[in-house]
Amino acid sequence: MAAGKHPLGVRDDFVWGASTSAYQIEGAAFEDGRGPSIWDIHSRTQGRTANGDTGDIACDHYHRWPEDAALLKKLGVGAYRFSVSWPRVLPRGRGAVNDKGMDFYDRLIDGVLDSGIQPWLCLYHWDLPQRLHELGGWTNRDVAGWFADYATLIATRFGDRVKHFATFNEPNVCTLFGYGMTWCAPAAEDRVAYLKASHHLNLAHGAGVDVLRGLVKDVSIGCIYNLQPVHPADETVAADHEAAAKLDAHWNRVYADPHILGHYPNVVVEDYEPYMQAGDLARICRPMDWVGMNHYGPIWTKAAPGSQMGFAWADVKVADAHPEIGWEIFPEAFTEQLLETSARYKLPVYITENGCGRNDDQEIADADGYVDDFYRITYLKLYTAAMKAAIDKGADVRGYFIWSLLDNFEWGSGYGNRFGIIRVDFPTGKRTPKKSFAWYADAIKGVLG
Ligand code: LGS
C-alpha cells in the first residue's frame, strides 16, 4: 500500500468525493418525459413526509447542474457520486427510452469530466418507476431482468466515459423501510414482501454486475451498503438481544454477504428459503471490485412482537449529546465498522457517505445565505480522524465521499433536515457554500484546520 503524505494517512491515490442522489436533488419531476417513481407517489401520500414535501423541484439540479459542476470543481474533489433516475430514462421502467432523459445524463457526465472530476454512477437510489411497482416492483422476481435491461441501457450509452459504477445505494434501507416498514416508498409493511424484495434485489445486483462487466471496458463495480453496529435497547432483556441479532443480519449482512461471500447469514437463512431457486446464490455472488460503505452512527433496537418484522427502532441515550453537534456521535463505531468491513469482505472500501444533518430551524443562514456550520466541521473532524484510526490499524480504505454536496430532499424529513456543505435556499435554489465547504476543500489538500 502506498504510504501517503496526507495528514490523515490516506494513500496517494485516495479518492475524495461528494455524493448526491437523483430524486433528492434533480427536481423537474414532470419535465421532458420523466415518468413517475414510487417516491413521487409516496411523498404525495398523506403523512409520509414532513410538511408533505416532495422532490418535484428539490434543488432544481436538472436545470442548475452546470453551477453544481462548477462548485464541485471549486471544492477540489476527484470524484462525484450521483444516481440516475430510472424513470427519467425509462418512463415506464422498461421499453421505450426517453431520449431527453438520456441527454441530461450525457450533459452532466461530460460537464463533470470537463471539470476534471470522475463520475461515479449509482444505478439505483430508491426511485423505482411506478409502472414497475404496479407490476409488483421488487416483490416480482422479473425485476432482476428489468434491472439488467436498464443497466444495459446505461452501460451502453455512458460506459465509454463512466468507469465507476454502483449497482445499488443502501439495499437494506429501501427494502426494509420500504417493504418491511413504512419509512420509505412503497411503505408496504409486509414481512413476506420484504423478504421477496430483498432477495430479488440481490438477484438484480448480480445481473447488473454481469451486464456492467460485459459492456464497460476497464470498469470498477461496487455496491453501496449502509453499515452500522446494532445494539439491544436493554442489555438485560433477552428479546431485545434476539431483535438486535435479527436486525443486525438484515441491516448489515443480508446484501453484502450473498453478494460477496455467496451465502445469507445463518440467522436469517431459513427466512429466505421459500423464495430461493436453485442457482440463485451463484447468480447473486458475482465478482466485485470494491465495497461502498455509508455510515452515520449505531442503531439501537427492541423487540416488537406485534410488528411485521418483530423489531423496532429504540431511542437510547448512551452518551450525552455532543455539545456542538446536538447528536450523540460515535466516531469509534466508525473505526470499528471500517475495520470489520475491510476484514470481512477483503475488498477495497470506499466511504460513499458520511456527513452531518442539522434540522432546518437550527441551521441559521445570515442575510447573504451563508451558514457558519462549525458543528458540521466538528463532526467531520471527528469522523475523518476515526477513518484515520481505521487506516492506521490496517483497514483498506480507498476513498471518502461526503454526504452531501447540497442541502436536499431528505426523504421522510422533507426539506427539514439539511446535510449539505452548500446551502440551498428553497425554493429559489440559490446556492451558498457553507463554512464546512471551505473546511472540506482544505482537508482534501491536507490542511486540517
Ligand atoms: O440522504 C440520505 C442520507 C442522509 O442520512 C441518503 O439518501 C441515504 O443514502 C442515507 O441513508 N442517508 C442518511 N442516513 C442515516 C441518517 C442518520 C442520521 C442520524 C445519525 C445519528 C447518529
Image (tube, rainbow, N blue to C red):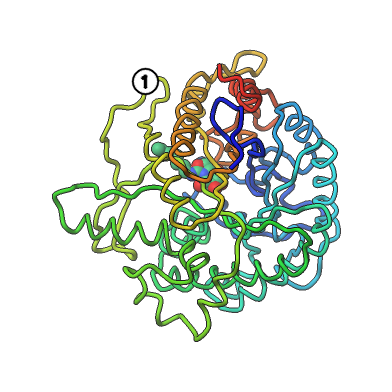
Q: Which residue occupies the foreground of this view, 274 or 291?
A: 291
Question: Is 359 on the left-hand or right-hand side of 205?
Answer: left
Give the class, few, some or many, for how many residues have Cα within 10 Å of label 1's Cα (few <14, many ≥20): few
- Residue at the bottom extreme of this rendering: 278
Q: What residue is shown with label 1? A: 323
- Residue at the image point whose x is 47% and y is 27% from the top: 379
Q: How many marks?
A: 1
Give how far across and how far down residue 239 sits, in percent. 19, 59
Give how far across and how far down residue 67 sits, in percent. 79, 32
Q: Is mark 1 within 8 Å of ligand 1?
A: no
Q: Which residue occupies the foreground of this view, 41 or 122?
A: 122
Question: Is 54 on the left-hand or right-hand side of 175?
Answer: right
Question: Is 206 on the left-hand or right-hand side of 213?
Answer: left
Q: For mark 1, give the secondary structure.
A: loop
Point out the image quarter for the N terminus: top right
Quarter assignment of residue 11? top right
Which amino acid type is shown beneath numbered disc 1? Pro
Q: Which residue occupies the foreground of this view, 379 or 233?
A: 379
Give how far across and how far down residue 295 sits, in percent. 47, 43
Point out the image quarter for the C terminus: top right
Q: Which residue occupies the foreground of this view, 19 or 372?
A: 19
Give how far across and how far down residue 293 sits, in percent. 52, 48
- Residue at the image point whose x is 67% and y is 51% from the top: 83
- In the picture shown, does residue 96 fall above or below 251? below
Q: Is residue 14 visible?
A: yes
Q: Is residue 52 visible?
A: no
Question: Is 105 on the left-hand or right-hand side of 41?
Answer: right
- Residue at the image point whose x is 38% and y is 32% from the top: 329
